[in-house]
Image (cartoon, rainbow, N blue to C red):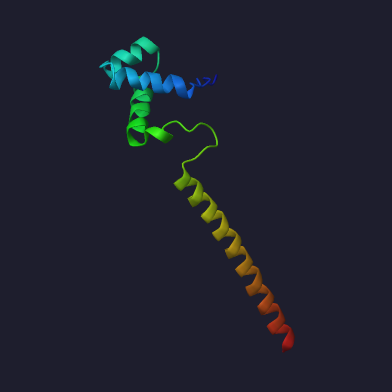
Amino acid sequence: MSQKKRKAYSKEFKQEAVQLITDKGYSIAEASRNLGVEYSVLRRWKKQFEQDPSFAFPGKGRQRPHDEELRRLKKDLERVTEERDILKKALAYFAEDQK
């Protein structure tokens, strides 16, 4: 059983591929055949570019500012919840010790 290695495309390549479709009038299928990229991949790139051109292809580890803030807030909530649980356990321990 062999696993296929995923091709990695640069941000510039993706932008140029989408420009072929949007600016030059190529169909997705035609651009797909010419570039050697799967139809579904090219369609997804086009959709990402149309949704937010400035953050269309962020790359590995880079997120949109909104997504980054959401990740940070979730991490903070997890930390605060853990601290709260520790304090509850300590309170129960000391309350039991008073009896």
Residue pictured at 54% horizontal, 52% vertical: 72
Taking 65 as reference, is 19 above or below it?
above
Query: Quarter of the image containing the N terminus?
Result: top right
Residue 12, x across and y down, in percent: 45, 21
Which is nearer the eye, 74 or 1?
A: 74
Query: Quarter of the image containing the C terminus?
Result: bottom right
Residue pictured at 29% horizontal, 16% vertical: 29
Taking 17 as reference, is 87 above or below it?
below
- Residue sitting at the far top: 34
Residue 77, x across and y down, in percent: 54, 60
Residue 86, x across and y down, in percent: 66, 69
Judge left or right: residue 24 versus residue 5: left
Which is nearer the eye, 39 or 72?
A: 72
- Residue sitting at the far bottom: 99
Judge left or right: residue 26 versus residue 5: left
Residue 5, x across and y down, in percent: 53, 20
Residue pictured at 52% horizontal, 50% vertical: 71
Q: Quadrant of residue 49?
A: top left
Taking 44 as reference, is 27 above or below it?
above
Residue pictured at 44% horizontal, 30% vertical: 57
Which is nearer the eye, 4 or 87?
A: 87
